[in-house]
Image (cartoon, grey):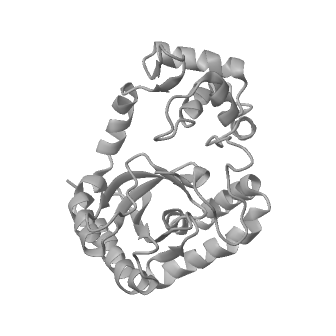
Amino acid sequence: MATETDSGATRRGLRRPGLASRRIPLRLNDAELAARHGEDRKFVWSLARAFELLHAFRPGQGPLGNAELSARTGLPKATVTRLTYTLTQLGYLRQSELDGRYQPSPALLAIAYPVLANIGIRQMAQERMQRLADHTGASVALSSPDGDMMIYVSACSSSALDALLLDIGSRVGMTQSAAGRAYLSSLEDDEREAMFEHFAGRLGPDWADLKPRILDSIAEIRERGFCYVDREWREDVRAVATPIADLDGTTRMALTVGGPAFALAPEQMVEDFGPRLVHLARGLSRAPMR
């Protein structure tokens, strides 16, 4: 499933990421890494770039060569070549014998699985999320922050229609997604302001239009427990979302109900799905640790 960085049109005159360039922003580019860690002698730049390189791969887009990875990440091709060689030797990338391009190896799952297994609320929420998906005829997802994106760690979909199913590992941007805005609402004021400064630097002129809409969503969550975002992340999708904490009480995440705009009426989203989502989140937050 496409993410906000490579999806279709956004509304209200915003530029669509990826039209002018196929570059995929790193979670932290070299300038941002330098600002944070330029004086830190313990910081290993090659390790950081290797992890950021892995973010250039996207579901359904197939293998990538060194030139493509360089274009997508903005890293020099010589750097990319060394990184892909090392990651291949370690078994985290596989290189095609036909064209020499690379794709992620299943070995990466060994790194990811302990992360998923340690998200306590994920296991407890699955059955209840599926019941909500069946009731709404939509998709229900649990997501966690990943830089300035939200990454899906659990997802359920109704079989009633071709709902928007985001697989585990899919990412959506914080600024135009209901999930992202729900997460931002859970931050302390200083944490949220730091994120806003980051968005302003990355989004440029678009930020002036986006910021008031994010603040409106945050106010909406404080008033009724959830926000409703209509066709901003993608022009054919609407969603409601609410913040939720993992069972440790500190890890902040988001629960979302979303689906095709043609199948989900705004009144239905606001009057039925949103309150049910808040009820689910509150029930899970009160659940005892296992």
Of 164 and 189, nearer the camera is: 164
Left or right: 94 with respect to 201?
A: left
Q: Position of residue 184 (x, y in %)?
A: 55, 64
Left or right: 56 with respect to 194?
A: left
Residue 253: tell me if it is visible. yes
Q: Position of residue 19 (x, y in %)?
A: 70, 50
Q: Position of residue 213 (x, y in %)?
A: 64, 74
159 in relation to 225, above or below = above
Left or right: 59 with respect to 110?
A: right
Q: Position of residue 226 (x, y in %)?
A: 45, 76
Which residue is located at x 50 percent, y 67 percent?
A: 186
Which residue is located at x 53 percent, y 74 percent?
A: 230
- Where on the picture, by quarter, is residue 194? bottom right
Residue that protrudes farthest toward the right in the picture: 205
285 in relation to 75, above or below = below
- Where on the picture, by quarter, is residue 174? bottom right
